[in-house]
Image (spheres, rainbow, N blue to C red):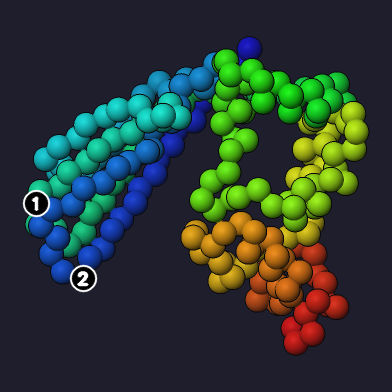
Amino acid sequence: MLKLLYEITHATTYDYVGNVSVSHHLVRLAPRQSGKQNCIAHELVVSPNAATVNTHHDYFGNLSHFVAVETAHQQLVIKSQSRVAVLPAFIPEPLETPPWEKVRARSRSDHSGKALEAHEFLYPSALIPPAAEFADYSRPSFARGRPVLDAVTDLTRRIHKDFIFDATATTVATPVLEVFKQRLEMPLRREHIVAWRLNWLPNRAPNA
């Protein structure tokens, strides 16, 4: 089977107003190992040189680097270079996947292997609590007995159609429910258009 070989470079630069005497960083830039993905080589370069670099795998299996820089600096550069071989992903036919109810039941009852990974996403988080609004929105995509991948694909299509990206509307700390409620109050203006794929909706942009 044909593999795709990727050479990946990622660089992050921090510029500080004054000298920083000590800085600690947790870096997750190493590609993961999986059945379809093989990280052949990975190198992390820190400038100025780090006094300490320790590695560990976090709960989700990501290779993490703890980096401590103990030299006074006004700029910090962290550069990751990787070589990754990737096999083509197997994508099943949406209509041939199990009914979504069956997948839901297994995610609730089976706490082993891949089912356990899905089970963990059933619980609320600080920014994503259960809400009736989410259920009402997703319900049209999840008709009784509908194959799960077909349902998820339809839900993804609707989200792409119904939500408008606005970099100024929220922050990473904005609760998802607030974002959800704002979607009908965010008119698409000319300055929001970043690609032809966005839909122009003049009736929702009175001053555009």
- The answer to which of 63 and 5 lies nearer the viewer is 63
Q: Which residue is mark 2?
A: 17
30 up-or-down from 111: above or below: below
Q: Which residue is mark 1?
A: 71
Q: Quadrant of residue 79?
A: top left
Residue 3, visible in the rendered structure = no
Q: Tell me the residue at 26%/46% (across/down).
A: 25
Amino acid type of the residue tagged 1 in the rendering: Thr
Amino acid type of the residue tagged 2 in the rendering: Val
Q: Name the mark on residue 38.
A: none
In this picture, residue 101 sits left or right of residue 131: right
Q: Tell me the residue at 57%/16% (across/down).
A: 113
Q: Percent x, y for residue 194?
A: 66, 65
- The answer to which of 143 and 86 lies nearer the viewer is 143
59 up-or-down from 124: above or below: above
Q: Secondary structure at mark 2?
A: strand
Q: Secondary structure at mark 1?
A: loop
Tell me whether the residue at label 2 lies in contact with that at label 1, contact meaning CB atoms closer than 8 angstroms: no
Q: Earlier in the sequence, mark 2 or mark 1?
A: 2
